[in-house]
Image (cartoon, rainbow, N blue to C red):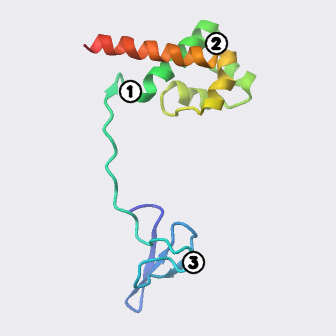
Amino acid sequence: MNSNFTDMGVQDDRRVIRCHCCNLVQFKSPSGLCVKSHRPLEPPPPQSAPKLVPIRGFYRPFYDFAFAVRLCRIAAGITQRQACAEIGVPRTWLSKIEGGRVVPLWRTVERLAPVLSVTPAELVQIAMVLGSDCARERA
């Protein structure tokens, strides 16, 4: 069951349910819509996510950029802690980017690139070169 929807119990053969949008607790209406937000009370059917092929424990769309960030940081001779201290963010933030668990926004790349002694465009180019090299290795 989806964690956004909470079944609050049964009263008078009617289900009490919480709307995932406005958090209003209400009886389920015959229309199945929330009284306040007019959105469906039942969770939408699960959609199948596109299958990603893991490469060395990382997923392909994030791996090249994550590896490029790590290579540039090591080439600049700084630790994650030092890089994050310059930007003013927690170390775990950079760790998630380098681990491929988070894809940073472009403004984040613009803040991070000068610390790594590259431009944002160069960082993306490095990631693209790494991606083409990995594709050649698999072929």
Q: Amino acid at mark 2?
A: Val
Q: Determine whether, in the image, residue 46 is placed left or right of residue 22.
A: left
Q: Secondary structure at mark 3?
A: loop
Sequence-first disc among 2 and 1: 1
Q: Quadrant of the C terminus?
A: top left
Quarter where residue 62 is shown: top left
Q: Quadrant of the N terminus?
A: bottom left
Give the residue at mark 1.
60
The local crowd at label 3, few if under 14, some if 14 to 19, many if 20 or more residues have their Cα within 10 Å, is few
Residue 59 in sight from this viewpoint: no
Closest to the observer: 38 or 43? 38
Give the residue at mark 2.
118
Q: Which residue is depicted at the point 68% across and 20% down?
A: 83
- Residue 129 rendering spot, x and y as whole percentages: 45, 12
Q: Amino acid at mark 1?
A: Arg
The CA distance from mark 2 to mark 1 is 23 Å
Give the residue at mark 3.
36
The CA distance from mark 3 to mark 2 is 51 Å
Q: Secondary structure at mark 2?
A: loop
